Amino acid sequence: MTVSVCGTLDEILHPASADFRSLPDLIGGLMDRLADRAPLRGGALWLQDMGTLVLAQDQAGGRLCWTADGDPNDAAADPEAVVVPITYADTPVGEMRLVLDHAPDGVAPEAPILHDVARQCGYLAKRYEVRRWAERRFGRPLMMVGMSRALRELDAFLEQAAHSALPVLLSGEFGTEKAPFAAAIHGCGPRRDGPFVQVNGADPAGTPADWFARAAGGTLFLSGVDEMTPALQGQIVQHMPSQLGQWLDAPGGWTHSANGAGNGAANGIGGTRVIASTTADLRRLAEEGRFSRPLLAELDFLCATVPPLRDRPADIEPLVLAALERHGGRADETRTDELIALCKAHSWPENLFELERVIARLAVMTGGRPIRHGDVRRHAPWMVGGAMPAEPESAVHPNGHPNGHLVGHPEAAPLSPPAPAPADHWVHCALTREQAALARLHGGLRKALVFLGERFADPITLDALSRQAHVSPSHLSYLFRTELQTSFKGLLGRIRIHKAREILAADRRLPITEVAMNVGYGDLSHFEKSFRRIVGQSPREYRRNLPGTAARG
């Protein structure tokens, strides 16, 4: 009898992940599903500091119950029991003793799946340990939720990386769990009792010298390192003991520890470990001269990517349930299949940040009753029937308010008849770099507008623009729609037509074809249709109606 390890492991883990509330619930659900999939006659699972889960057969086909304490040897004394250790970072944390039925031909089933399940139990035990530690340390029960393959790969990375002193570089789109994962790396390692200092790269307070001094003996987390100025990047790199011998007089001296990680102290715990996060491709930025190549060289040792929610459909349900619980909703009473289906179909351009806001809104606005399709349509309408529409430029958010707010939402403004979106205002900001208006925008959107104002005549795609803005294409599209009430293509078209009007006024003899080419239109017909749609008349009519002597086009 052969067991398909990968397929069966997903089938066991994914349904069990909804039992996230406590480690006993989660492990119990996991073992219950293992008993459904594997030919078990009995057994037990013991985890350190938690007790023993006993699997005993009864007339109903099986029974699972936790005991306050116990020894798996007592619960599974069968001499044929398969003993599978549960470890984390090579340290025993528990054990499974399972009695397997033989196949009809007398052959015992293969056991690799049991070792995989035991490995996941070790990871889960560590997650809940970190959750308790984070609640004491930060006042927040930080924990990665879900058991998708992508998240299990992060568990494996964490197991290896936490005990090293090497720098860690975490990549991921806006809204992914980079900060909780950085805290978990710190909390799982030997520096967990030392300081954890987080610096906001977009608006850092203090100096690199201060940061490293405060984080001595612990971890310095550079959140959004790609947003830091070149000057700060240069200062940071000079305060890091070089792993590569780029300099010999870094503050704090140099010690080469037994595991090959320079950490600035002979005991292997001193010095400062650096973890950095980024939403941009630092290698590409360095190649373009927009990120410090020496700093990237020192950070690029242990690297991991926190995947977006659209690549983790198996994690959506437990994340939704966890968010409901955090915001006062009893998940057992408010969760519905309709809600989960809509959440799994949505692309979540802002990832966990967006999911948290939406679920909190639904939990509050439905008053603790089951959340139905109509509730989502009313309070998060862009999730119903696909993504929010990107056109037309003057469209408001689907909830009817030009700023995307909802009645009853903490950020809500009174609903009134929507006014046309000020697209021409953003055209002006893009072309003039009006600092007061641009400063209020998301950093990625601000970079996108400046780039459009400078390069409007180039053949710009959303993918190319997203690379300039250092955000994902889906998130950049979301920012255009929610902050500017227009689409990327819609705003680019308005910028081009605005420049065309300036050219028509400045040189009244320039052929219309050249005007079109000068502002980025290779197709004259497309240019003329766009001009008429935005201006209300053709380019020739517009020029004829300009004050002064009309010129032939």
Image: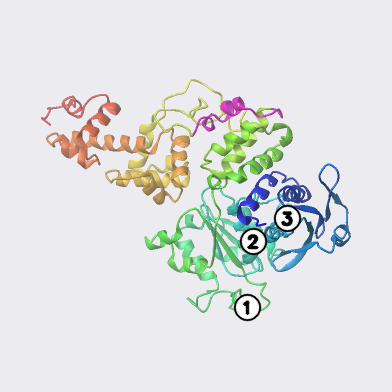
Position of 58 relative to 190 (above/below):
above
**Which amino acid type is shown beneath numbered disc 2?**
Ile
Q: Position of residue 89 (x, y in %)?
A: 69, 67
Query: Which corner quadrant of the image does residue 431 belong to?
Result: top left
For label 2, the SS is helix
Can residue 439 be seen from the camera position used here? no
Q: Is residue 530 magenta?
A: no
> Is residue 190 placed above or below 305 in the rendered structure?
below
The first of marks 3 and 1 along the sequence is 3
Of 209 and 51, nearer the camera is 51
Tell me the distance, in whole angstroms, between the alpha carbons under discs 3 and 2.
Answer: 43 Å
Of 410 and 70, nearer the camera is 70
Q: Quadrant of the N terminus?
A: bottom right
The span picked out in magenta is 367-386
Q: Earlier in the sequence, mark 3 or mark 2?
A: 3
**Disc on the earlier residue, 2 or 1:** 2
The question of residue 378 being in magenta is answered with yes
Residue extending farthest to the front is 105
Q: Which circle, 3 or 2, is nearer the viewer?
A: 3
In the rendered image, residue 408, in percent from the top left (x then y), is placed at 62, 27
Q: Is residue 289 visible?
A: yes
Kind of residue indicated by mark 3: Ala
* C-alpha separation, residue under disc 2 versus residue under disc 1: 19 Å
**Whole-Å distance between the Cαs marked 3 and 1?**
52 Å
Up-down: is 494 above or below 96?
A: above
Nearer to the camera, 411 or 520:
520
Q: Residues within 10 Å of mark 3 (few under 14, many from 20)?
A: few
Q: Residue at x 73, y 54 (%)?
A: 104
Q: Residues within 10 Å of mark 2 (few under 14, many from 20)?
A: many
- The residue beneath circle 1 is 257
Residue that badge 2 annotates: 185
